[in-house]
Image (tube, grey):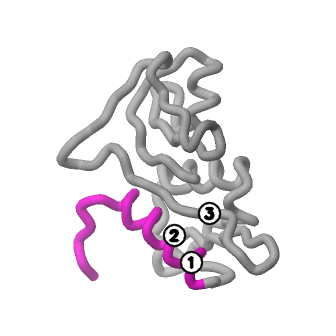
Amino acid sequence: MAVLTDPISDFLTRFKNAARAGNEEFTAPYSKIKADIAEILKQEGYLWKYEVVTGERTELKVSPKFVDGRPVLTDLKRVSKPGRRHYVGSDDIPRVLSGLGISILSTSKGVMSGASAKRQKLGGEILANIW
């Protein structure tokens, strides 16, 4: 098993690849931050469901959402990376695709969407933009 330097990017890449390939579900190694990201993606309508599967290794089983056979996810971009972190205040949270996409932030109150962080006047690290 390879050592991952950026497990969040790995999760997002698996999500994007599964959606584009038309896969009904995919698995990824479990971590709390990945489960939090999956919960936001579910709330925002990019996932049908996700579940934590315990066994030899704890994994996330994730089901991307499709409408008329096409994935809801168009694309995504990892913003803050291990080598270059990107922090913003609540006033500087970007609008993704003029409001058609979402930002995912890691704040002092946990991982949340950009809209939620803005409502609560919280800044933080921008993990990804999704549209």
**Mark identifier at residue 16:** 2
Mark 1 residue crowding within 10 angstroms, few (<14) / some (14–19) / many (20+): some
**Mark identifier at residue 109:** none
Are the residues flagged by discs 2 and 1 in contact, CB closer than 8 Å? yes
Are the residues flagged by discs 3 and 2 in contact, CB closer than 8 Å? yes
Q: CA–CA distance between discs 1 and 3?
A: 8 Å
| Tag 2 secondary structure | helix
Q: Is residue 3 found inside the magenta-colored segment of the image? A: yes
Relative placement, left or right, of 89 versus 122 is left
Relative placement, left or right, of 96 versus 66 is left
Q: Which residue is mark 3?
A: 73
Please name the residue shown 57% across and 37% down the image: 112
Mark 2 residue crowding within 10 angstroms, few (<14) / some (14–19) / many (20+): some
Three-letter amino acid code at disc 3?
Leu
Q: Which residue is mark 1?
A: 20
Instruction: State the residue lying farthest toward the left.
Output: 83
Please name the residue shown 26% across and 38% down the image: 85
Between residues 110 and 83, which one lies in front from this camera angle?
Answer: 83
Going from the N terminus, do you reach mark 3 or mark 2 first? 2
